[in-house]
Image (tube, grey):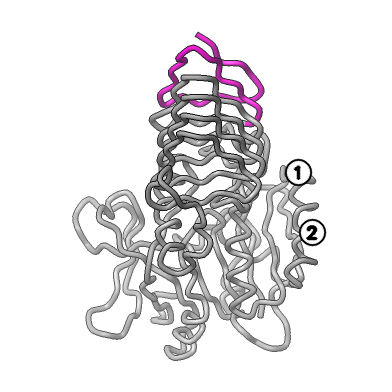
Amino acid sequence: MKALILVGGFGTRLRPLTFSMPKPLVDFGNKPMILHQIEALKDAGVTELVLAINHQQPEVMLNFMKEYEKKLDIKITFSQETEPLGTAGPLALARDKLVDDSGEPFFVLNSDVICEYPLLEMIEFHKNHGAEASIMVTKVDDPSKYGVVVMEEGATERVESFVEKPLHFVGNKINAGIYLLNPSVLDRIELRRTSIEKEIFPEIVLEKKLYAMVLPGFWMDIGQPKDYIAGQRMYLDFLRRKAPEELVATGDHVIGNVLVDETAVIGDGCLIGPDVVIGPGCVIDSGVRLLGCTVMRGVCIKEHACVSNSIVGWDSTVGKWARVVNMTVLGKDVHVGDAEVYNSGAVIEEPQMVVM
């Protein structure tokens, strides 16, 4: 079975982290974002994966994938656009990599999506409905800022229409960014900048061949900091339910769900959690308070500092008594000084020193 992951975005919403690393390789839950998807696809029986990348993806992306191609025993190839092709054009560009004599459907995933990835269930859903295309949808409390998927009444699970950012309530199910498509869908896509959501899916809807599976469990597009932090909370809660052995941090200094790499060092008198991820090689000095945050590889948090609802990028330092709060994002190799420096909602590029 084959799959394609759309990784062509420039990661502007996650800057400054994406100044140092392509967005798919930014850590989430102590592993690169895209690795969550690759592992799920592998578990669902995918043996060949195509990454649709843009013309500005650096060599680090290629080198990383070569490493994991060997580790996971999955064939990974690249389809590189020379100009932006939207969300459907990359499928046309990669047609020769996706189509073979088997006629089997293939997965398409947006690289920003984190969820429980019920891909085996989706394969069964697709076959049972005889669909040309199946999409996953997820329920949200406020659908007004999304494209809403309207489904026929009853139990058909057939898609009736798409409504982009509706002014009035038409439903609460939105596109979750995970598709299972028959090869015939590629015949509908021209090699140009094309939107699969606005141009291709509505065409399939008119022929009553598009079905929607409601995604069980959590879902989040983690392409911007506030959603990254919200998605991390959901992901850690998922680990608590399905893989509690991964949340090994325990003791009086830990509150709630905390994921700590085994190479991290944590000092005395700290209070950590809930919803914290600490990466490899981190040093958390005594008296530190961490909650609702990510501390990436090689970070040092000095005595009595506090990091809350923020992201601390690789190899950065937060000084003694400093405060990094309210969705602050530190890029790679940023150094926040001592003496009660207070950063609230800041976005700080690398490398630099932040002082009073």
> What is the three-letter code of the residue carrying label 1?
Pro
Judged from the image, the secondary structure of the residue bearing numbered disc 1 is loop
Q: Where does residue 48 sit, x and y in percent of width and height?
A: 72, 73
State the residue position of label 1: 58
Left-right relation of 294 to 69: left
269 in the magenta segment? no
Q: Image quadrant for the N terminus?
A: bottom right
Q: Where does residue 276 sit, x and y in percent of width and height?
A: 46, 45
Q: Residues within 10 Å of mark 1 (few under 14, many from 20)?
A: few
At 76% across and 72% down in the image, what residue appears? 73
Judged from the image, the secondary structure of the residue bearing numbered disc 2 is helix
In the rendered view, tell whether residue 67 sits above or below residue 310. below
At 60% across and 50% down in the image, what residue appears? 261
Residue 67 marker: 2
Q: Nearer the viewer, residue 238 or 281?
A: 281
Q: Nearer the viewer, residue 66 or 90?
A: 66
339 in the magenta segment? yes
Q: Where does residue 236 sit, x and y in percent of width and height?
A: 44, 56
Q: Magenta segment range?
A: 332-356
> What is the three-letter code of the residue carrying label 2?
Glu
Left-right relation of 179 to 331: left
Residue 263 marker: none
Q: Are marks 1 and 2 in contact (CB under 8 Å)?
A: no
Distance, label 1 to label 2, CA atoms, is 15 Å
At 45% across and 69% down in the image, what residue appears? 242
